Amino acid sequence: MKHLIILVCCFFIKAAWAQPPVTQPSPDTEQQIENITENNADEETDDDTYLQSLSEFSRNPINLNLADAATLEELLLLTPIQIDNFITYRTLLGKFLTIYEIQAIPGWDLATIQKIRPYIMVSQAVNLFNAIGSRLKNGDNILFVRSTQVLEKSRGYKLDSSQATNFYYGSPQRLFIRYKYSFKNLLQYGVVAEKDPGEELFKGSQKYGFDYYSVHFFMRNAGIVKALALGDFTVNLGQGLTQWMSQAYRKGPDITTIKRQAAVLRPYNSAGEINFHRGIGITVGKNNWEATLFGSYKKIDANFVAADTSLLEAEDIVTSLQTSGYHRTKSEVEDKGMQRQVAFGGNFKYRLYGLQIGVNAVQYQFKLPLQKSQYPYNQFALTGKTFGNYSIDYGYTYRNMHFFGEAASTNKRKLAFIQGMLMSVANNVDVSLLYRNISPAYQSLYTSAFTENTFPTNEKGLYTGISIKPAMGWRVDAYADVYKFPWLRYRVDAPTTGKEYMFQLTYQPNKIFSIYSRLRSESKPINYNPTGLTLNPVIPQPRQNWRTQLSVKLNSIFTFRSRVEMVWFDKRGSAAENGFTIFTDLLYNPMMKPLSGNIRLQYFETDGYNSRVYSYENDVLYGYSIPVFYDKGYRYYINVNYDINKRISLWAKWAQTIYSDKTLIGSGLDEIEGNHKTEVKLQLRYKF
């Protein structure tokens, strides 16, 4: 019977799998990354760990006969139900004989298989390279060198350093160097050095070279030791209430990504200077249990205020923790490393059939006490030298339903709760639900739960989503999220409620043609006081956007892609704004030739910042850009990749934004004279 299933699967899907490995995000992932940037105040993440992981799995696919649930979760391409169905199928029917057999796994439709296919394989061979000595000798050495620069000099570089008190000390280049040794997904180590634009290099405040260094060593699956991290690493616990340092999705077109899935310990070798620990972590496990312990000591940037010497009991304090990672000006250099942070904690996890239970704890100690400014919205902010977060999380799969959640508390017994459910109602219908109830006094560091707020605090809400595949090639995705903020927030001087809705229709009959159209509507109150009243009125300001994107593979070499998007902000209110953008891409990607690339031409026009638009851009390997567009103008970019040989590859990107009615771009030290801004990026990869 099993052999018959395999033959049928081969007949129907072999042709559909003739595709090369890919390392660029899927269209759904691109939208998720755009949403992350929009929700985090336009701050793009420098963490490219996920893109590195996809590349590693593309070079060394996961052997489905050896993979466990945790390994499949690393891909972020499968739902918990699909993973559980995979484990159950393999347990009942034994090892896979061919890759085409996965078509028989319940819930693994053709779209899922096409997404995951480049990263999986089936082999009966036993891994012969588990020995540490073999791992250290048989891996890949990769050196990356990347340089980025805005060609037009901004005001911060033009000021006379002998007269000005606030200017950029360093050069306008951003430099990034990364060396990494990796053996499959079992061992890696490396070093990162990075300098941001405006920071000095081998002089002044940076006498030892680069502004930021990162070193890591990470090993997996060495007997009872499931993971060992030395140097820089990330920690992910539960559903993000206690700790979550890796990239995490929020609301987007894929309604099944509401659950946080990642290994507790992961290596860190990216350019971001905030979301990681520096120390040691270890995960040990056997059979159904797994335990993790970690400890970290790190200097972090902080706004330092010296003690008032006129007071006997006064002490130095920190009013805020700085998260930009920039050290370009005198004040930014003074804030660098002013706070000392010790963090330690752990996780205990137990799996039994479809049930997983975890216990999590994180404790922090600071050298200087944290004392936020005395604003009403800061009443429940983190204070003092020590605090902690503790939680219990679970996941349980029963037939076609998966339940998950986390209940967390601070050391002051302030509570937070998340409960979610994923359900496959039918072969072509998926449903998701998520409820969160987080106290205004619940505070945490380095977290990313599924919330409307950037951090999990001061929120109650209910999210519901549905995905329907009514016919071959068609998909309908929709969600509704209703939430409440019980206490004040920054720029919101009253408790408020909000709501968000999204509807997306996708048509992809084959790998050649795809189109989606999305309507998204949200309403979130904010202070609005144009007349300068004593008390700030808080009013809802609705925002709707409609987007349609088309992609056509013209032949085996060229792909055409285009998007149109419109934005309506406060459509019937006194602060009404409209926004519009359209772009066209042409991608050149021959399978057997050393040269590839893509170009884009984009036009945008908005009435102001509130009607801004975002567009994901292709970039150099492991890089991406999501610039924000407002006012009126054009943007174009050209990407080129040339593989000189099997060892050396080059990337180059030229991007320019031209504004129609501006003579100044930006503000403050970033102000540029003129109507255009040009960015150049060069990257070299050397494999040895």
Image (spheres, rainbow, N blue to C red):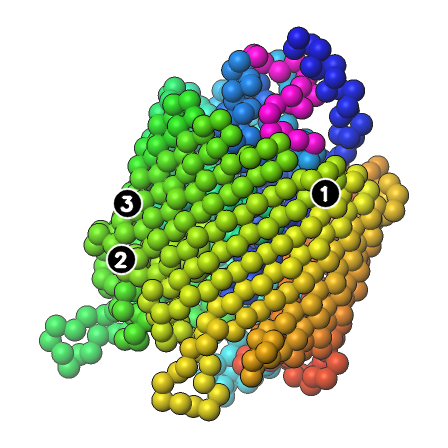
> Quick one: quadrant of the N terminus?
top right
Q: Is residue 591 above or below residue 621?
A: above
Q: Residue at x 21, y 74 (%)?
A: 307
**Tag of residue 366:** 2
**Tag of residue 474:** 1
What's the magenta region? 93-110
Q: Which residue is mark 3?
A: 390
**Front in this rendered view, residue 263 or 107:** 107
Q: In front of the other: label 2 or label 3? A: 3
**Front in this rendered view, residue 13 or 316:** 13
Q: Hey, what amino acid is under mark 3? A: Tyr
Residue 216 in the image, given as x and y percentages of width and height: 46, 42
Q: Is residue 564 left or right of residue 402?
A: right
Count residues near mark 1 (Cα–Cα under 10 Å), then give few for <14, some for 14-19, many for 20+.
some
Along the polypeptide, which appears first: circle 1 or circle 3? 3
Could you tell me if residue 674 is visible in this image? yes
Residue 383 in the image, given as x and y percentages of width and height: 25, 63
Q: Is residue 428 above or below residue 519?
A: above
Q: Give yes or no for contact between labels 2 and 1 (Cβ–Cβ under 8 Å).
A: no
Q: Residue at x 58, y 69 (%)?
A: 543
Q: Is residue 279 left or right of residue 597?
A: left
